[in-house]
């Protein structure tokens, strides 16, 4: 298939992107972006050095090799011409303008508990020590983008068509000038440049017909089965044959449904703690059969208390770009064959903020991760979306038939081996029977018995293998018949934990609850300090009283009194159990031994009665 | 409520034997509280004690008084929660759980103060009840599979 046909396919299935009101950055042309940047190198223990200043940097020059030390980081830096300088604008005013029309609604902190809020406070404070994108960059970038659009308003994407395992994969890459999730929408990070991607998976039939089968959206570096939806899945919205993407405000992460998504950020140094909590959680619910609320089983439970919550607002109430919408896509920039600027430039596409968590560092290009390794989404687009195990519907039946054939020949081979071994086994059995009662044959008799045992095991193993293969063949036969009849598995069978937006019920919290969520941690700290300063003699009792009061207020605001009562009671039960164990250790031990003894006695007597 | 042929019909929840068992255990708990309190209070001559100062009371008598102050008022809500179990009311479950927590807290406070022996069986019973009340079988009967948290 030629380039023209690929372009036609890419245009035929190009997406519609719906943004949230207040979004200030939209997909742009890579050439325009690079024209605004300079190329820099950050070498270990040195000041950053400019390799190519703006406006000398072009895509061709970016693709040239720049040999450097192993730990050097190459990065682009937005370096707008002086005429677009926004320094005079008061940052607060510009930020407010950036959020134009956007209201956060129920804040992220009102949706999570105290530990998450405390972790969040520590994370926010850590921004002072970590490398971060300076606040003025967001305002400058917004002004710069506005000027660019005033010069020439275009909305562009970069795309390529790949063939892998009989699938045709259409990849759409979107470059944004800036990710202002933190400064614009109370999110986790800000960074210069943002690359986002979606994929459409097509099946080509022998008749030449091409049908869309799956769509996968990249969202916060996720991968696997959860990122894809089948074309007939009601969650996937379409305008004609154009999939609809809801882009997160500022983050530009892609979602299938409009809504507000609670996204949790893992802190690497807390992962052992998270693992421990998850294991305890498992013991508590599975082994001790204690109740597990649906909310916690869906991933919002105890194990998430050490993750930092952020809300990704993908409301879709702002600008829409796509065929037949407010704004249309410009002619796509095709990435196949891979252009030199994609393959040769391994650096970051924006400021290198030197953030140890990398959240504030700009991303690398479409082909690479920040560490310079090739992205899986680039070299294995099927595996990235968990589709490498699925043949396209156009070839699924032939794959099933081929597998059936393989299994049939394996079955025949197994049958021959079973017969051989069975014959051998029977022969040995006869010999063993013949040797019985012959003292001089003792040694050989024992060796034969050992061989009989081994062969018997082998035959058993072969028969089990054959039975399993036959069962699989039967399943494949049924599946093949279903495929022939045009039946398919349920569209959402592959999804274990779909990322769902917050329900309207959970968003319906009072203003008072929001205020409480925003101020509770600060108020608690103030109360503690006041207690320390003015009433030190009541420190322990006061601390307990403050904690209980805040916990009850919190539970009342979040409608979780039952959960609080349960947790407190179970906590007291565990403490009391430890007290009893301490007081009556030997008695408990004796009772345990007696119970075990009684159980063994009962089990043995029951066996005798049979 | 569910709609059946145009009429509103109250949604019926099944009451498994585990729920009935917990209801009976709660009644037994209330009876036990009263019996234990009576057993602890009876040996003392309260008429004579009333004339004396509280501070001069023997320690055993003070303990008996404290335990009774915790257990006798607790028996009433425990009976109410047992009735709640009979009608499969969520409030009944919540009251039962709250009472286990309150009793455990009272017992722990007494334990770290004078450590009276009579609190140990109460502690053991409350621990078993708390875990049993939170077991999947019992909670699903009240909150169902889809209930994340209560009222």
Image (tube, grey):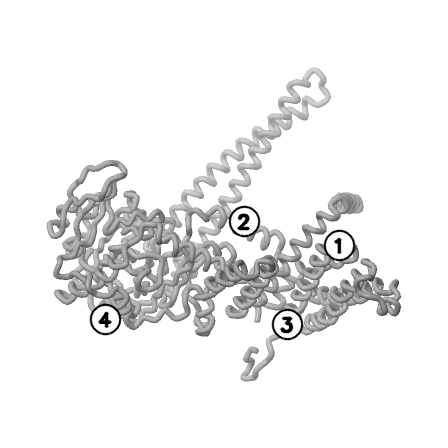
Image check: A301 left or right of A430? Answer: left
In this figure, which residue is indicated by the disc labeled 1?
B115
How far apart are the alpha carbons under marks 1 and 3?
33 Å
Residue furthest out toward the left:
A56
Q: CA distance from mark 4 to mark 2?
A: 49 Å
Q: Are marks 3 and 4 on the same chain?
A: no
In the picture as drawn, the residue positioned furthest to the front comes out as A534
Residue A589 in picture, x, y percent from top left: 74, 44
Q: Nearer the viewer, residue A515 or A460?
A: A515
Mark 1 or 3 closer to N-term? 3
Question: Pointers 1 and 3 in contact (CB under 8 A)?
Answer: no
Q: Which residue is mark 3?
A: B91
Gap in angstroms between the C-alphas marked 3 and 4? 53 Å
Q: Secondary structure at mark 2?
A: helix
Q: What is the spatial separation of the Cα atoms under label 2 and label 3, in whole angstroms? A: 32 Å
Circle 2 packing at 10 Å, graded few (<14), some (14-19), many (20+), is few
**A426 or A340: nearer the eye?**
A340
Can marks 2 and 3 be said to lie on one chain? no
Mark 2 sits on what residue? Answer: A279
Q: Could you tell me which chain the residue with mark 1 belongs to?
A: B
Q: Residue at (67%, 64%) from the top-left corner?
A: B102
Measured from the top left, where is residue A317 in percent x and y?
31, 71
Residue ID at (21%, 59%)? A157
Q: Which residue is mark 4?
A: A325
Q: Neighbour class for label 4 at 10 Å: few (<14), some, many (≥20)? A: some
Chain ID of residue with mark 2: A
Q: Is residue A405 left or right of residue A444?
A: left
Could you tell me which secondary element the residue under label 1 belongs to?
loop
Q: Nearer the viewer, mark 3 or mark 4?
A: 3
Query: Dividing the picture into quarters, in which one does residue B14 lie?
Result: bottom right
Above-or-below relation of A456 to A211? above
């Amino acid at each position: 298939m030629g380039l023209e046909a690929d372009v036609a396919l890419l245009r035929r299935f190009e997406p519609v992107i719906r943004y949230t009101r207040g979004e200030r950055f939209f997909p742009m042309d890579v050439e325009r972006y690079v024209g605004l940047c300079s190329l820099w190198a950050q070498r270990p223990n040195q000041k950053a050095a400019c390799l190519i200043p703006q406006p000398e940097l072009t895509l061709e020059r970016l693709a040239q090799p720049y040999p450097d030390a192993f730990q050097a980081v190459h990065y682009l830096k937005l370096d707008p011409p002086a005429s677009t300088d926004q320094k005079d604008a008061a940052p607060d005013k510009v930020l407010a303008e950036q959020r134009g029309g956007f209201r956060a609604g129920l804040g992220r902190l009102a949706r999570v508990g105290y530990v998450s809020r405390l972790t969040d406070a520590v994370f926010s404070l850590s921004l002072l020590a970590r490398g971060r994108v300076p606040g003025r960059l967001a305002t400058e970038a917004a002004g710069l983008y506005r000027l660019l659009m005033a010069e020439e308003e275009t909305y562009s994407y970069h795309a390529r068509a790949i063939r892998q395992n009989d699938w045709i994969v259409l990849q759409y890459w979107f470059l944004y000038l800036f990710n202002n999730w933190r400064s614009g929408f109370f999110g986790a990070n800000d960074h210069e440049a943002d690359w986002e991607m979606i994929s459409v998976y097509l099946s080509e039939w022998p008749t030449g017909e091409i049908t869309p089968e799956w769509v996968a959206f990249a969202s916060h570096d996720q991968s696997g089965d959860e990122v894809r939806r089948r074309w007939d899945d009601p969650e996937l919205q379409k305008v004609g044959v154009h999939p609809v993407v809801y882009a997160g405000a500022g983050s530009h992460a892609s979602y299938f449904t409009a809504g507000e998504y609670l996204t949790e950020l893992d802190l690497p140094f807390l992962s052992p703690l998270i693992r421990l909590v998850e294991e305890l959680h498992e013991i508590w619910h599975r082994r001790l059969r204690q109740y597990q609320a649906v909310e916690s089983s869906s991933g919002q439970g105890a194990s998430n208390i050490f993750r930092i919550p952020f809300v990704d607002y993908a409301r879709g109430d702002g600008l829409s770009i796509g065929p037949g919408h407010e704004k249309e896509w410009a002619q796509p920039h095709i990435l196949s064959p891979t252009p030199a600027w994609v393959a040769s430039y391994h650096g970051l596409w924006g400021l290198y903020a030197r953030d140890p968590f990398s959240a504030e560092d700009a991303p690398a290009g479409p082909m690479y991760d920040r560490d310079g390794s090739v992205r899986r989404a680039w070299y294995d687009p099927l595996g990235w979306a968990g589709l490498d195990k699925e043949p396209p519907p156009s070839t699924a039946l032939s794959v099933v038939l081929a597998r059936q054939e393989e299994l049939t020949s394996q079955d025949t081979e197994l049958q021959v081996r079973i017969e051989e071994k069975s014959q051998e086994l029977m022969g040995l059995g006869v010999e063993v029977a013949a040797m019985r009662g012959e003292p001089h044959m003792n040694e050989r008799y024992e060796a034969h018995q050992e061989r009989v045992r081994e062969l018997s095991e082998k035959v058993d193993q072969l028969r089990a293998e054959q039975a399993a293969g036959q069962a699989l063949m039967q399943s494949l036969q049924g599946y093949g018949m279903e495929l022939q009849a045009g039946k398919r598995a349920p569209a959402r069978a592959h999804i274990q934990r779909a990322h769902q937006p917050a329900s309207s019920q959970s968003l319906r919290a009072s203003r008072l609850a929001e205020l409480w969520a925003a101020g509770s941690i600060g108020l608690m700290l103030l109360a503690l300090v006041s207690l320390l300063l003015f009433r030190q003699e009541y420190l322990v009792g006061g601390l307990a009283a403050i904690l209980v009061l805040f916990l009850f207020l919190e539970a009342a605001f979040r409608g979780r009194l039952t959960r609080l009562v349960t947790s407190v009671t179970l906590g007291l039960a565990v403490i009391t159990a430890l007290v009893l164990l301490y007081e009556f250790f030997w008695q408990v031990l004796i009772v345990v031994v007696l119970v075990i003894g009684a159980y063994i006695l009962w089990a043995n007597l029951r066996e005798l009665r049979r | 409520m569910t709609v059946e042929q145009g009429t509103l019909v109250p949604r019926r929840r099944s009451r498994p034997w585990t729920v009935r068992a917990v209801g009976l255990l709660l009644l037994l708990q209330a009876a036990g509280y009263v019996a234990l309190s009576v057993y602890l209070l009876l040996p003392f001559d309260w008429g004579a004690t009333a004339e004396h100062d509280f501070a001069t009371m023997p320690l055993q008598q003070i303990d008996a008084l404290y335990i009774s102050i915790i257990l006798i008022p607790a028996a009433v809500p425990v009976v109410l929660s047992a009735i709640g179990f009979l009608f499969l009311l969520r409030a009944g479950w919540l009251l039962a759980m709250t009472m286990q927590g309150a009793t455990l807290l009272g017992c722990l406070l007494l334990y770290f103060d004078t450590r009276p022996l009579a609190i140990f069986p109460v502690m053991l019973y409350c621990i078993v009840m708390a875990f049993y009340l939170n077991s999947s079988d019992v909670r699903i009967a009240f909150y169902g599979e889809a209930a994340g948290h209560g009222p």
